[in-house]
Amino acid sequence: MSAVTTADPPASAAAGARRRRRRGRWNPPLISGLVLFGLIVACALCAPLLTSQDPIKQNLAQAFLAPGAPGHPLGTDSFGRDVLARMLYGARTDLQVGVLAVVSPFLIGSLIGLVAGWFGGWIDAVIGRVVDVVIAFPFLVLVIALVFAIGPGTTSIYVAITLVGWVAYCRIVRGQMLVAKEQEYAMAARASGLPTWRILLRHLLPNVVLQAVIFSMSDIVLTLLAIVTLGFLGLGVPPPTPDWGTMIQEGQQFILTKWYMSTIPGLAVVITGLALALIADGIVERANQ
Amino acid sequence: MTPPLLEVRDLHVDIPMPYGRLHAVRGVSLSVDIAESVGLVGESGSGKSLTLRALLGLLPRPARIVSGTILIDGEDVTGLSAKQLKRRLTDTMSMIFQDSLTALNPVMRVGDQIAEVPLRKLGKSRSEAKAIAVGLMREVGIADPERRYQLYPHELSGGMRQRICIAIALSTKPRLILADEPTTALDVTIQAQVLGVLRQLKQEEQVGLLLVSHDLAVVSQTCSRLYVMYAGKVVESGDLVDLVTAPRHPYTFSLLRSVPDPDKRVARLLTIDGRPPDLTDPVTGCSFAPRCPFAEDACREAEPELAPAGSARLSACRRVDTAQRWTAMVEQEVSQEAVSRQ
């Protein structure tokens, strides 16, 4: 990039700046991340078009087919279900649960963090202690306990992850808020007599939420992993609904002879994580312009 | 006689510290008439910014107002409920800050920031608010306001941003603008332009100005009356010309003499020895006494109060002949140096 800039005559400095800005807006990590994630989402949405197989139809006669078998490009699992179909339909389950289980902690945590950081005092102290208590437990232990208490199923996964996950957003936003509220634009907004809720939502939230957005990208991956773990413990998405976590767990018993059974869904998790991490990087780069 | 637009009586601001309380503003009283420009000068830490911020309830934590009375149009507003007080203060006054980059919301178009108060507080429609904002931008001297309305703060120059800040301050239709070092972050030519905008507003819109600055040049270009603050107190006040030509308080004198004057050849600029007192300790005697070459025992014993000193003048120094004595002292030193050099 610097070579390009120096090759330009100085007269086009403004044009160069504009080009850099545009490059920042649509930078390579952001584009590749969005494309990759878009492909995964497209696969999930177009699952019926991409395979004619039923993801939950068992055929024990055709169990354990290796990838490349006729009619089953990715082989079949221990019940003879088509792996490709389960992968595609599993993407639907996992992306839905992963994204939804991040949205509500994101919203709740950010709002609580906003309030804690702005008002300070006893409000902040109370919220801070609650956050400390939740953080004191390992994430998975608490989620597992909660899912166990509520009962397995996607709804209880949402609830459990929300109850545990909001603290991270709360902390991030609160920390940013402590800086932002002393900025003069916050003071200027107060000086013009705008209502507090408006100062918080219109002036401060957009300035502090970026870190939380970036964190949410990796949080989706962590949530996917949590769902996988829950599936492993029999607390996840109930069978026979296809999901990557359950597939990894099922393949794990045959890992020594049929390595691909766990590897294929595992790769899907990795690629999804990569796509989200690239998007997060791209957002950072874009924000630093 | 009409009461002043804003009057502050005996304002005290404290900052709680781990080891005690810093008494940052110690009984400041001041007043601003309708459409009057008043300057508040002093060095860093003299409490001038805190005084200004206290007026709008914008003290940085943990500073707080201990006591004091604020009168608007002669009416005591300190007794109002918190909500009413805030409303009354923000309806009367608005504020502009030193650093226009941090004073603007970085993720909001500048035009929307100006239109926000008309839209949200004055109940205008979206298009009316936009028209008001464009009008205000034109008023503060921004060319091509329709295009600049769409820009973000970082896309504008420092002078342009400060104009936007002034436009935002004007959007509440204030009768008084509180300006906290509004030109310190700008270079001199832009500074002159921004001060020009403020002066023009005063003449055309009858908007008063309370300007906090450590820069006497800025204040003397804009204000007609001055308050000089030192160590959390007003030590001298009066008409700008009177104060500059015949300072009564030795602090005012030394402040004026420490600024170079391009028209006058001065052998050397005056510096003030020592440093301001630590306001966590109780101050006994005149706070300037340790740095004052003319301090007497009486100055160190009891803190002198502001007392009338000539027409519309107040000074917290008992002496009358400060200027003459100090001039004499400086001249003597200079001549001694000249002699020793020869």
Image (spheres, coloured by chain):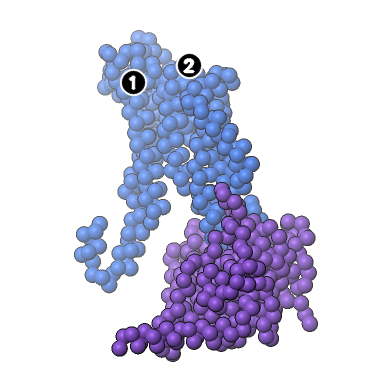
Chain colours: A blue, B purple
The outermost residue toward the top is A61
Residue B250 placed where, x, y %?
56, 78
Quadrant (top left, top right, bottom left, bottom right) of the C terminus of chain B = bottom left
- Quadrant for residue B27, please give it: bottom right
On screen, residue A76 versus residue B273, left or right, reads: left
Circle 1: residue type: Ser
Chain hosting mark 1: A
Circle 2: residue type: Gly
Say whether disc 1 or disc 2 marks the residue closer to the N-terminus.
Answer: 2
Residue that badge 1 annotates = A262
Given residues B221 and A256, the one toward you in this image is B221
Residue A262 placed where, x, y %?
33, 20
- Quadrant for residue B314, please give it: bottom right
Question: Is there any visible trace of residue A142 in the rendered image?
Answer: yes
Mark 1–mark 2 distance (CA, rounded to whole Å): 17 Å
Question: Is there any visible trace of residue A189 in the rendered image?
Answer: no
Chain hosting mark 2: A
Given residues B319 and A121, the one toward you in this image is B319
Residue at 57%, 46% in the rendered image: A117
- Quadrant for residue B59, please give it: bottom right
Residue at 41%, 33% in the rendered image: A221
Quadrant (top left, top right, bottom left, bottom right) of the N terminus of chain B = bottom right
Is disc 2 placed on a helix, strand or loop? loop
Give the vertical position of A43 relative to B179 (above or below). above
Residue that badge 2 annotates = A234
Residue B237 placed where, x, y %?
63, 78
Given residues B219 and B268, the one toward you in this image is B268
Residue A281's disc number: none
